[in-house]
C-alpha cells in the first residue's frame, strides 16, 4: 500500500501518517521525491485499510498495490517516467544513446572516447573509474583520479557522465562528480549499496543481476526508491544461460516485461550482453525495435590495448552506423533521438 501526499503536505502531515501506521502495528517508509512525498506501507493491508488514511490531512491518495515492489510499480504510477540526467531525458518518447569506454584509463583515451560517443549519436558519456573485476589482478580502475578525468571531459564535451560505484562508502564521492550513478550487475543485490544510492540526489542506472529474475531486479530498484530516490533507470545487460557463444544472453523480452511492470525507463547494454563487437549493432537494432528507452555501448579508440573489455568496444568505423541505426529506427518506434547537449563555448573555440 502506498500513501501519496499532496504537493503542499509538510513534515507534520507526513509524521501523522507514519505515526498512525506504526501505532497500528505496521511500518512506513517515507520517500521524498522532487514534487511530492510518498509513504510506502508494510503490514496487514486489510487492517491498514481500516485506518482511514485517506481522510488524514495532507493525504492525496492511498493506493493498494498487489506487487511485492510498490514505488517502482506501474500500479502506483501508471504513466511511464522520464528520468533526467544532467538535463538529458531518458523515457518513453525518446531514444537515448549512452557511450564511452568501459574504463577510464587516461585523459586522452577518455576524451577520444567521448568524441567517439558524440559521433555515435550519444548524449551521455559512460566510463568506469571503479571497476568490479572478476579477477583481483585485473585493472581495478583509477578511482577518484578517474572521476576527475570524467568531470574534465564533461566540461570539454558537454556530455553528462554515467559512472559506476561499487562501495557504499564511495557513494557521496562518486555522486559529487557524476550525473548518474551506475550499479553494476554484480552489485544488483548489494543492499547497503542500493540504500546508499537511494539516499543521494543523483539518478541511478541499475543493471540487472546476471542471475536475477525480473522480479528480483525490480525489488532491487525498490530498495533505491524506498530511500527516496525514484530517479532510476533499469538496464538489461544479459543473463547467464547455458549458451557459451555469447558472453551473456540478452533477455530481449525483459524490456517490455519490465516496462509493463514498472514505470521506470528500461535501456539495453548490447556490449556486455554479447561481449563481441560484431554483435553490438545487431543487438542495438533489436533493443530499439523491442522498445528500449535507450542503449549503452562501449567504445574505445584503441581496443587492442584496452585495459578492460576491448573485444566488445566499438571502433571509429562502427560509429556512423550506430548513429544511423539510432536516427533511422527511433521514428519507427515513435521516439525522438535525444540530441547531445551543445559543446561548451570555450571548448568549441579551443
Ligand atoms: C560496465 O558497464 O562497465 C559493467 C561492468 O557492466 P556489468 O555490471 O553489466 O557487467
Ligand atoms: Mn565492461
Image (spheres, grey):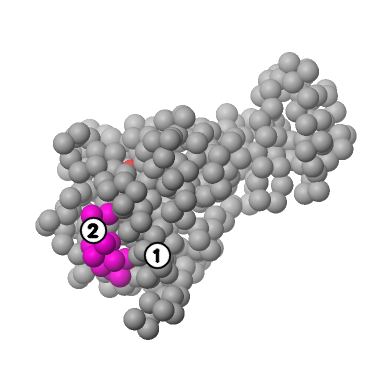
Q: Which mark is residue 106?
A: 2
330 is higher (above) or lower (below) than 297: below
Q: Is residue 37 magenta?
A: no
Q: Can you say which quadrant of the picture contains the N terminus?
A: top right
| Image coords of residue 127 (percent x, y) | 32, 54
Q: Earlier in the sequence, mark 1 or mark 2?
A: 2
Q: Which residue is mark 1?
A: 154
Spot the residue most to the left: 304
44 is higher (above) or lower (below) than 170: above
Q: Is residue 215 left or right of residue 36?
A: left
Residue occupying image coordinates x 41% and y 79%: 346
| Image coords of residue 337 (percent x, y) | 45, 69
Q: Residues within 10 Å of mark 2 (few under 14, many from 20)?
A: some
Q: Is residue 17 left or right of residue 331?
A: right
SS class, disc 2? loop
| Image coords of residue 115 (percent x, y) | 30, 70
Q: Can you say which quadrant of the picture contains the C terminus?
A: bottom left
First to last magenta residue range: 104-117
Q: Which mark is residue 300?
A: none
Amino acid at each position: 500500500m502506498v500513501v501519496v501526499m499532496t504537493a503542499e503536505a509538510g513534515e507534520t502531515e507526513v509524521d501523522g501518517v507514519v505515526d498512525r501506521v506504526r501505532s497500528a502495528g505496521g511500518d512506513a517508509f517515507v520517500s521524498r521525491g522532487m514534487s511530492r512525498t510518498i509513504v510506502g506501507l508494510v503490514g496487514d493491508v486489510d487492517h491498514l485499510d481500516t485506518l482511514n488514511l485517506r481522510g488524514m490531512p495532507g493525504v492525496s491518495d492511498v493506493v493498494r498495490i498487489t506487487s511485492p515492489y510498490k514505488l517502482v510499480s506501474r500500479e502506483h504510477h501508471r504513466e511511464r517516467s522520464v528520468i533526467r540526467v544532467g538535463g538529458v531525458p531518458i523515457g518513453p518518447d525518446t531514444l537515448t544513446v549512452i557511450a564511452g569506454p568501459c574504463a577510464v584509463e587516461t585523459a586522452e583515451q577518455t576524451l577520444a572516447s567521448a568524441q567517439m560517443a558524440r559521433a555515435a549519436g550519444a548524449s551521455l558519456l559512460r566510463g568506469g573509474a571503479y571497476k568490479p573485476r572478476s579477477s583481483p589482478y585485473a585493472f581495478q580502475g583509477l578511482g577518484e583520479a578517474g572521476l576527475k578525468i570524467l568531470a574534465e571531459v564533461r566540461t570539454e564535451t558537454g556530455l553528462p557522465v554515467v559512472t559506476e560505484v561499487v562501495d557504499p562508502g564511495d557513494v557521496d564521492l562518486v555522486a559529487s562528480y557524476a550525473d548518474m550513478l551506475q550499479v553494476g550487475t554484480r552489485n544488483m543485490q548489494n543492499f547497503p549499496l542500493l540504500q546508499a544510492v537511494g539516499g543521494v540526489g543523483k539518478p541511478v542506472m541499475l543493471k540487472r543481476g546476471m542471475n536475477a529474475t525480473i522480479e528480483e531486479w525490480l525489488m532491487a530498484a525498490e530498495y533505491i526508491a524506498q530511500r527516496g530516490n525514484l530517479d532510476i533507470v533499469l538496464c538489461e545487460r544479459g543473463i547467464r544461460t547455458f549458451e557459451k557463444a555469447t558472453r551473456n544472453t540478452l533477455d530481449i523480452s525483459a524490456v517490455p516485461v519490465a516496462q509493463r511492470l514498472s514505470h521506470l525507463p528500461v535501456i539495453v547494454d548490447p556490449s556486455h550482453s554479447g561481449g563481441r563487437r560484431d554483435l553490438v549493432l545487431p543487438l542495438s537494432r533489436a533493443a530499439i525495435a523491442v522498445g528500449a528507452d535507450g542503449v549503452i555501448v562501449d567504445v574505445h579508440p584503441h581496443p587492442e590495448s584496452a585495459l578492460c573489455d576491448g573485444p566488445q568496444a566499438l571502433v571509429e568505423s562502427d560509429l556512423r552506423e550506430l548513429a544511423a541505426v539510432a536516427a533511422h529506427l527511433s521514428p519507427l518506434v515513435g521516439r525522438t533521438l535525444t540530441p547531445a547537449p551543445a559543446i561548451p563555448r570555450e571548448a568549441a573555440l579551443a
